[in-house]
Image (cartoon, grey):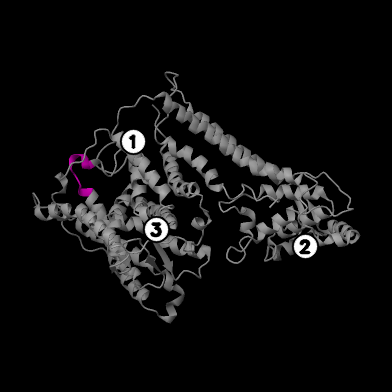
């Protein structure tokens, strides 16, 4: 049987994890715009107050989970002395890490005037130095380390780490257990750069610390043969854990005070359940023989990194503050003391995600894949698979084309809405003469677009080149391309409709439609890009809705017709082609043949579920019961 494409599996899981929390918000009939705000500055989640019963119960639960391992290690003695190679000198780049960390620590906790422009960017050098230090110590003890022996793997870890922690920042939008201070004045791009650099150090730091702890056998003594955990029906357990984890991710936005711990647990269980379903090794595979060594070392590595994260955050200028329901007291640095328990599963998550993305066919080191016998498909499962692939992508195709058809219908209607009237109705003769003269000097026709220019059209091409070099963007008009201006075309659309030039209105409207798309908040993509997100986020949308609502002035001569320029054709071919591609992939994915037996292969494996859900959850999240699919001019 042909194996599932590992790259597709990775993409499916990433999309699936992204869409689940949004699906829960939509199912709860809550607006999703606050959860997608960027930068995330608004506090919209109200947390429960401190509760002694909850604090005591969680403390007892954490102690019950941790103490057996501590007692086991303390009571055990190494069977034989560790066979480590002779220690090497501490490398020069390790000393460089010590210097970087020490100097940056001083600069981060002080407030030198000359360093003020860079004060908010001290967290990344601290962790770059830390990574050099732990790798240097590992090199000194064993003669090898991640930086020296696996440089390509380490480089990928930095890249994946940035995406990895951005996902937790995304999940935090739904529970708001932490928020940042000292970043309110940063623009969206500055915030992204400021945050991405330290985020990129998370995985290299945790996994580098794991490698260092692995050189100290005493830390995991006795854990190689401890408590075996076996499942008689691993696939059934995997399906149950997968379903519960998905429900948990869907629910964190609706019940943040109750389900916030799942922010750290659910992604881990989703990925490991999928691995188990596919018969592959997971981070928990060794538990079947009672070997807890790697699990404990990963948890301890994240706890050590967590200690330094919270320590260096304490007096930094740009820092995070915690707001945790029920257990927000008794802080060590800024972290409530029970919150450190979240670092324990986080260490497992770091290893699972790094291996899942960098090594999707063979999971964590320690053995080969586990090949479970294939399960014969049932009629119900086959029906679900085919329905998942065909109906889902047909709906995706329908969603791609629907908004354009709805608004094109409105533009082609000469009776276009009479709820707003423009001032030129007072002087129809003057307005008609003005429009004719303006068309002569400012209307431009090309094969790819027609419309109004920002500056006057003349016969001398040198003038266009001269103006284009000096007027590529105008604060009131947005970007200007080949003389075309979005602001001029928006106002020109209203003028065309008022003066009865429905041919121009049709042409301009078709271009607006093909370049504008609904956002999850109910606003429009094009106007959002051309508007100020902080001061006037809906100005462009309000203008377009206002212009679309204009009607021809009484007594004006109605000229119909118009055409869709090349950009409209290209845009709709792209939309339609995307839908057809989805439909084609659905058909191929739902019905494949074995090249030797010519019999259909069963594709009802769990890895196909995320791909289907990822296709129909975006339309579901974009649509809200209280918000029309397209901001109609009827409004």
Residue 149 lies, in percent from the top left, at 29, 52
Q: Which residues are magenta?
A: 286-294
Residue at the (69%, 65%) spot, across then down:
476
| 381 over 273 or under it: above or below | above
Local secondary structure at mark 2: loop
Say whether disc 2 or disc 3 marks the residue closer to the N-terminus: 3
Pointer 1 local density, CA inside 10 Å: few below 14, some 14–19, many at least 20? many
3D distance between C-alphas at marks 2 and 3: 46 Å
Which residue lies under the disc numbered 1?
Answer: 277
Whether 158 is drawn above or below 408: the answer is: below
User: Relative to residue 291, is residue 432 drawn left or right?
Assistant: right
1 vs 3, front mark:
1
Confirm or deny contact between disc 2 and disc 3 (CB under 8 A): no
Label disc, if present, on residue 200 of the rendered structure: 3
**Left or right of 243 on screen, residue 617:** right
Q: Which residue is mark 2?
A: 455
Residue at image position (73%, 45%) is 410
Viewer-nearest residue: 125 or 89: 125
Which dot, 1 or 2, sits closer to the camera? 1
Say whether marks 1 and 3 touch (CB < 8 Å).
no
Which element is circle 3 on?
loop
Between discs 1 and 3, the one toward the N terminus: 3
């Amino acid at each position: 049987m042909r194996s599932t494409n590992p790259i597709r599996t990775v993409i499916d899981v990433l999309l699936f994890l992204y869409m689940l929390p949004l699906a829960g918000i939509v199912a709860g009939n809550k607006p999703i715009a606050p959860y997608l705000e960027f930068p995330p500055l608004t506090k919209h989640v109200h947390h429960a107050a401190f509760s002694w019963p909850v604090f005591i119960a969680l403390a007892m639960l954490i102690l019950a989970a941790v103490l057996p391992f501590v007692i086991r290690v303390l009571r055990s003695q190494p069977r034989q002395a560790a066979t480590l190679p002779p220690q090497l000198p501490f490398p020069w780049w390790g000393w460089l890490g010590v210097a970087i960390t020490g100097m940056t620590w001083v600069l981060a906790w002080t407030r030198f005037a000359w360093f003020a422009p860079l004060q908010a960017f001290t967290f990344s050098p601290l962790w770059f130095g830390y990574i050099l230090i732990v790798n240097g110590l590992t090199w000194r003890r064993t003669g090898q380390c991640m930086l020296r022996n696996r440089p390509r793997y380490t480089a990928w870890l930095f890249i994946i780490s940035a995406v990895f922690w951005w996902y937790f920042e995304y999940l935090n939008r739904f529970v708001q257990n932490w928020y940042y201070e000292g970043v309110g004045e940063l623009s969206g791009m500055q915030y992204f750069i400021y945050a991405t650099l330290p985020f990129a150090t998370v995985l290299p730091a945790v996994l580098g610390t794991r490698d260092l702890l692995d050189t100290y056998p005493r830390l995991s003594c006795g854990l190689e043969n401890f408590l075996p955990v076996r499942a008689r029906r691993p696939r059934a357990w995997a399906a149950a854990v997968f379903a519960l984890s998905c429900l948990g991710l869907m629910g964190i936005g609706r019940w943040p005070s109750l389900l916030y711990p799942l922010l750290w647990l659910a992604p881990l269980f989703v990925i490991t359940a999928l691995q188990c379903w596919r018969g592959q090794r997971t981070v928990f595979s060794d538990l079947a023989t009672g070997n807890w060594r790697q699990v404990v070392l990963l948890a301890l590595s994240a706890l050590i990194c967590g200690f330094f994260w919270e320590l260096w955050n304490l007096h930094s200028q740009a820092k995070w503050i915690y707001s945790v329901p029920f257990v927000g007291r008794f802080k060590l640095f800024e972290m409530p003391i029970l919150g450190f328990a979240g670092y324990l599963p986080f260490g497992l998550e770091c290893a699972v995600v790094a291996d899942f993305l960098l090594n999707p066919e063979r999971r964590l080191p320690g053995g080969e894949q586990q090949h479970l016998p294939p399960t014969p498909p049932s009629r119900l499962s086959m029906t679900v698979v085919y329905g998942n692939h065909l109906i889902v992508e047909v709906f995706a195709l329908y969603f791609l084309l629907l908004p354009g058809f709805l608004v094109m219908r409105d533009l082609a209607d000469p009776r276009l809405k009479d709820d707003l009237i423009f001032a030129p109705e007072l002087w129809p003769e003057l307005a008609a003469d003005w429009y004719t003269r303006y068309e002569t000097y400012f209307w431009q026709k090309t094969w790819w677009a027609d419309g109004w220019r920002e500056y006057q059209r003349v016969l001398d091409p040198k003038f266009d080149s001269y103006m284009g070099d000096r007027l590529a963007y105008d604060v009131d008009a947005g970007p200007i391309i080949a003389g075309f201006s979005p602001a001029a075309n928006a106002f020109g659309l209203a003028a065309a409709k008022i003066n009865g030039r429905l041919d121009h209105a049709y042409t301009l409207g078709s271009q607006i439609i093909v370049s504008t798309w609904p956002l999850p908040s109910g606003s429009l993509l094009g106007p959002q890009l051309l508007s100020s997100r902080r001061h006037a986020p809906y100005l462009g949308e309000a203008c377009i809705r206002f212009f679309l609502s204009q009607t021809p002035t009484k007594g004006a001569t109605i000229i119909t017709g118009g055409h869709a320029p090349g950009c409209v054709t290209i845009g709709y071919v792209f939309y339609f082609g995307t839908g057809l591609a989805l439909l084609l992939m659905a058909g191929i994915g739902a019905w494949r043949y074995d090249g030797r037996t010519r019999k259909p292969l069963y594709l009802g494996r769990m890895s196909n579920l995320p791909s289907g859900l990822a296709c129909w959850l975006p339309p579901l999240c974009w649509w809200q019961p209280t918000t029309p699919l397209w901001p109609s001019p009827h409004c």
